[in-house]
Amino acid sequence: MIDTNSIFNITNQTEFEDLALQIFKFQFENNPVYRSFCDLLYKHPCDVKTINDIPFLPIQFFKSHNVLSSKNPIKTTFLSSGTTGSITSKHHVTDLDIYTQSFTKGFQQFYGPIEDYVILALLPSYLEREGASLIYMVDAMIKQSKYTESGFYLNNYSELKDTLAALDSPGKKILLIGVSFALLDLVERHQFNLSHTIIMETGGMKGRRKELIREALHSRLKAGFGVDAIHSEYGMTELLSQSYSKGHGVFNAPNWMRILTRDIEDPLSILAPGKTGGVNVIDLANINSCSFIATQDLGRVNNNGTFEIIGRFDNSDIRGCNLMVL
């Protein structure tokens, strides 16, 4: 068995790669869906010497299969939003403590202790449905905060405006985390000039507005809130870890997470830094599901390990998904 505490004690690239290879072997042996996928690619532990050799499971399998590496009882199932009538992803979680450790330690790595922040959440599209992993995370962050002002906001924009105006003062750390369309709705109703508040968008218009490129979205939000930078959170239903950007769309991943890019025409080929390709995620916190996922995002990894998300695949299916029909 792998000690899950070792996931969050990684301090360097060698430790990361060693543990990633151990987890690959563990999931190959204990995850029937992932094992079948690897078998079809003729990729077994004896063939995998580096993290670039590890097969990445197309993220669509979370829609069609139970992706599990554990026989323990499922504690909760996180569901993706999806559009009406579409099939949603299901991430079965057998150990919620791992998720809590991941988002707590991940946030702390880049921002410091959660308890030191007033956490204000403007996440209407997530609050209006069940099974959102983001709501679970932010609710736990609100409970960890030492400030009674922390809380969720749905459509009560005027109340949120008053709260922000009252709190935005020297000496307090304030985080407003919101879905993009709701943050735009807020600044169209009210003008701000904030000096001590972090504005963090979680991406996506969720069908409520026309999608905007990041530069246009951030420009409008910076003007509306009166801030110099818009922060971003990069996460998804199928992951238990998040990456953060403090501006300009450049993300940092926590120590137990890595982003690679794959060749669009040859999805088993990993690209060198600086080249745009499909985003592959290694999330070691996903030890009980699958830690190696090929997403539908397009991105670029920089030489220093930071990464940028460029967009999405035009087609809904990632090349390689038709390798397995069970």
Image (cartoon, helix red, strand yellow):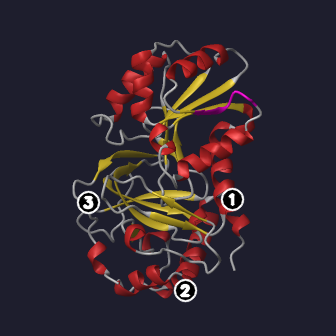
Kindly indicate the quadrant of the structure image that contains residue 92.
Answer: bottom right
Please report the residue visible at 51 percent of the width from the left and 43 percent of the height from the top: 127
Mark 1 → mark 2, Cα distance in angstroms:
23 Å
Residue 41, magenta (yes or no):
no
Mark 3 → mark 2, Cα distance in angstroms:
30 Å
Q: Which amino acid, mark 1?
A: Phe
Q: Is residue 243 visible?
A: yes
Which corner quadrant holds the N terminus?
bottom right
Residue 266 is left or right of residue 300, and the answer is: left
Magenta span: 147-152
Q: Secondary structure at mark 2?
A: helix
Across the whole image, how many numbered discs are drawn on residues? 3
Please report the residue visible at 35 percent of the width from the left and 50 percent of the height from the top: 299
Mark 1 → mark 3, Cα distance in angstroms:
33 Å
Residue 282 point in image, percent of width and height: 50, 63
Rendered view: 277 above or below 184: below
Identify the residue under disc 3: 316
Rendered view: 165 above or below 197: above
Q: Which amino acid, mark 3?
A: Ser
Residue 99 is left or right of residue 304, and the answer is: right
Q: Secondary structure at mark 3?
A: loop
Residue 37 point in image, percent of width and height: 39, 81
Q: Which label's residue is closer to the chain start, 1 or 3?
A: 1
Which corner quadrant holds the C terminus?
bottom left
* Main secondary structure type of the part rendered in magenta: loop
Q: Residues within 10 Å of mark 1 (few under 14, many from 20)?
A: some
Q: Which label's residue is closer to the chain start, 1 or 2?
A: 1
Residue 151, magenta (yes or no):
yes
